[in-house]
Image: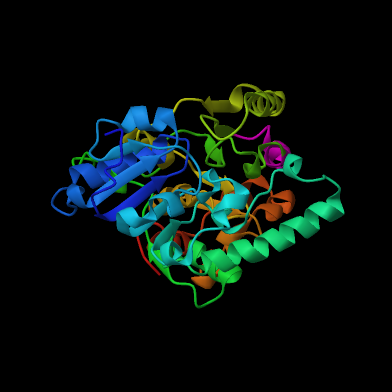
Amino acid sequence: GGTVIMSKKYKYLHILWHDELKFNRRYVEMLNLENKYFNIEEHCFITPHKNVYENLSEFHNMNLVKNGNLINNYGDLADWIFVHYISGCDNLSILFTKSKYAKKVIMRSWGGDELRPYIKTHEIAVTKELYRIVKNIYSFFYHKLLRKFRCIGVANIIDILDVKSVLGDKMDTYPISYGYVKNNNINYSADNVGENNDDTNINVLIGNSANPRNKHIEILDILSRYRTNNIKVYLILSYGAKHEYIVKVKEHARDIFGDKVCVLENYLELEDYMKFISKIDIGIIADTSSRALGLLFWLSFYKKKVYVERNGKIADGIVYKNCCPNYIDSILVSKFDEFQRVNNDELLKMKKEFGIHKTN
């Protein structure tokens, strides 16, 4: 690894633009180790991030490159280009992606973020009106580029609805899973892991990460009405936000719930994560985008009650599949018994639609 072999043509080029290791490692590992399904000689990986490269350099055809428009710079290397986290390219240069390369691109949608360009305010004059104008103009050309791509990689119907709402019904989508488990001995059955919480507390999980879009502070305030009930609040704060925000969330949670708060600050391997989710009673996903679909999958798989934002993409997907969402704003008028009460028929429907890997 280290230097892209420019003279060789690959079938697949993978651009790892995301400066992280949780998802990148799973993905690269899968393509390298599952030789029954993939011929690794057909795959080439490039990343502009030194720590990503160093962590993954043990794998075949892993290369460190200088950042820029990597689609243009390395588009001739392969027949197909898988793009992960296109936001890793700077705003302006991505707009100049050549059409001959764009039509080769399969872009993975990361919680809908990649569909909505983010422009750093320091890059332009920061008056709100000018920012709005610039963003609208930029979005027009950005979406024009995305429509040239061969397709958008998605997790499930929630991603698909999001893609169609932004790019139109003609935009093709294709299932690309985030996850990969090397250990085939893991037993996924709910019976094996322990489907139900066996203590007297109602265990409530807020969000899938420390990302502020999980609205931890707001949800904690909403749940404060139950602070004298048998409730335990769980927070996954191992990644996704600056240290200051994490500290603020922890302090706020403990101010309200005291020792009824449990904070997870270390990354859990999949088997441990499964065991953790199996002991949760209620999951609350406040992000309005199509993030946290992995959490939705496992909560649905173990038939847990899920509360979602009324105007969010996840709620749209649940309704589309003729399931009945539990809305977060209903908590404000629910007594504790109602908050924790479950409808087993609905949980079974949610498992069928969102707790089993499906492509449509």
Against 197, residue 114 (above or below) is below
**Total marks in image:** 0
The spot of residue 162 in percent (x, y) is 56, 64
Q: What span is in magenta? A: 218-230
Residue drawn at x 44%, y 72% as measured from the top left: 172
Q: Is residue 47 above or below residue 329?
A: above
The residue lying furthest to the left in this view is 36
Q: Does 268 appear above or below 119?
A: above
Q: Quadrant of the C terminus?
A: bottom left
Q: With 253 as the anchor, is 11 left or right in this view?
A: left
Foreground of the two, 282 or 292? 292
Residue at coordinates 75% horizontally, 39% vertically from top-left? 122
Which quadrant would the N terminus be assigned to in this image? top left
The answer to which quarter of the image holds residue 61 is top left
Vertical placement of 250 versus 33: above or below? above
Relative image position of residue 36 (x, y in whole percent): 13, 52
Between 360 and 66, the residue placed more toward the observer is: 66
- Viewed as shown, does residue 174 lie left or right of 171? left
Residue furthest out toward the front: 7
Q: Main secondary structure of the magenta part?
A: helix
At 68% from the left and 50% from the top, the residue drawn is 331
Residue 142 falls inside the magenta stretch: no
Q: Is residue 223 magenta?
A: yes
Could you tell me if residue 314 is visible in this image?
yes
The quadrant in which residue 312 appears is bottom right
Residue sitting nearer the eye, 336 or 293: 293
Location of residue 212 in the rendering, given as x and y in whole percent from the top left corner:
65, 39
Residue at 53% from the left image edge and 52% from the top image edge: 111
Residue situated in front as seen by the camera: 29 or 282: 29
